[in-house]
């Protein structure tokens, strides 16, 4: 059962998430937040190339097709890769809040094996916000958006300032990200809801 740890239960003073007025419209593709991101970047040859779309409220749908490079057991997706797909989908939710946040905790249930070549249909939503803490949940289904659940996760993201990346990231990549000519991607990487 997911969400079992106490730290993933929102506190009593948690509030409902508020979709930012400038969030992309439901159905709109979000695009990558960083070209070299293993989850969503198009410049990462063995990455997941996950494509996320804004949903209603503070929700996201996303798709990811398992490639041979993502195997753990023969012909099956590696569990860590599936956790990455969930993490990336959950992380994309923060763009609808216009908040920069990183994963603090991710609890994952692996319910069914996911074969190479299968497409994982993911959906995620923010369930509560308490100060800098953002609580969210996601599922990944096989055979279509209404197919059987293969993976699910509950997560706690923690809001950070851009300084988090500048302080901890490698300088060459930080500089390259800051001078990214793609305006939308730059905005997704740097914009913080004041
Ligand atoms: C220049 C270029 C810019 C590029 C811009 C790109 C932007 C777009 C990037 C998005 C990327 C997407 C990709 C997918 C999402 C990842 O995969 S993100 C990468 C994986 N995650 C990380 O690397 C995070 C590493 N951890 C940390 O840096 C720190 O532990 C954290 C999470 C920031 C928290 O540290 P902190 O800021 O010192 O906060 P702290 O006071 O410890 O905790 C705050 C609250 O959260 C709670 N908390 C913290 N951690 C946990 C935990 N693990 N469990 C439970 N509760 C926790 C604390 O108990 C505390 O609660 P309260 O006391 O307030 O009730």
Image (spheres, rainbow, N blue to C red):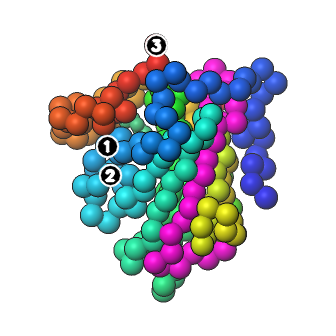
Q: Compute the Cα span from label 1 to label 3.
A: 22 Å
- Can you identify the residue that label 3 sits on? 194
Secondary structure mostly seen in magenta is: strand
Residue 160 in view (yes/no): no
The secondary element bearing badge 3 is classed as loop
- Can you identify the residue that label 1 sits on? 34
Q: Nearer the viewer, residue 99 or 60?
A: 60
Q: Is residue 120 magenta?
A: yes
Dot 1 beta carbon under 8 Å from ligand 1? yes
Question: Picture coordinates of residue 53 (x, y %)?
Answer: 48, 46
- Can you identify the residue that label 2 sits on? 41
The answer to whether the residues at label 3 and label 2 have Cβ atoms under 8 Å apart is: no
Left or right relative to 191: residue 108: right
Question: Picture coordinates of residue 163 (x, y %)?
Answer: 36, 24
Of the residues under marks 2 and 1, which one precedes in the sequence?
Answer: 1
The secondary element bearing badge 2 is classed as loop
In the image, residue 80 above or below residue 173: below
Q: Quadrant of residue 122?
A: bottom right
Residue 131 in view (yes/no): yes
Left or right relative to 5: residue 91: left
The answer to whether the residues at label 2 and label 1 have Cβ atoms under 8 Å apart is: yes
């Amino acid at each position: 059962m997911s969400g079992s740890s106490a730290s993933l239960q929102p506190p009593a003073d948690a509030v409902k998430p508020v979709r930012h007025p400038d969030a992309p419209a439901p159905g709109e593709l979000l695009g990558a937040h960083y070209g070299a991101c293993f989850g969503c970047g198009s410049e990462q040859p063995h990455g997941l190339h996950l494509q996320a779309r804004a949903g209603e409220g503070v929700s996201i749908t996303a798709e990811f097709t398992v490639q041979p490079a993502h195997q753990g057991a023969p012909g099956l997706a590696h569990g860590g890769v599936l956790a990455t797909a969930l993490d990336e989908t959950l992380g994309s939710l923060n763009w609808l809040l216009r908040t920069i946040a990183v994963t603090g905790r991710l609890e994952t249930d692996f319910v069914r094996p996911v074969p190479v070549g299968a497409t994982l249909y993911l959906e995620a939503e923010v369930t509560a916000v308490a100060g800098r803490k953002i609580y969210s949940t996601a599922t990944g289904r096989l055979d279509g958006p209404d197919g059987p659940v293969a993976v699910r996760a509950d997560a706690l993201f923690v809001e950070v300032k851009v300084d988090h990346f500048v302080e901890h990231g490698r300088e060459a990549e930080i500089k390259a990200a800051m001078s990214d000519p793609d305006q939308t991607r730059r905005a997704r990487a740097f914009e913080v809801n004041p």
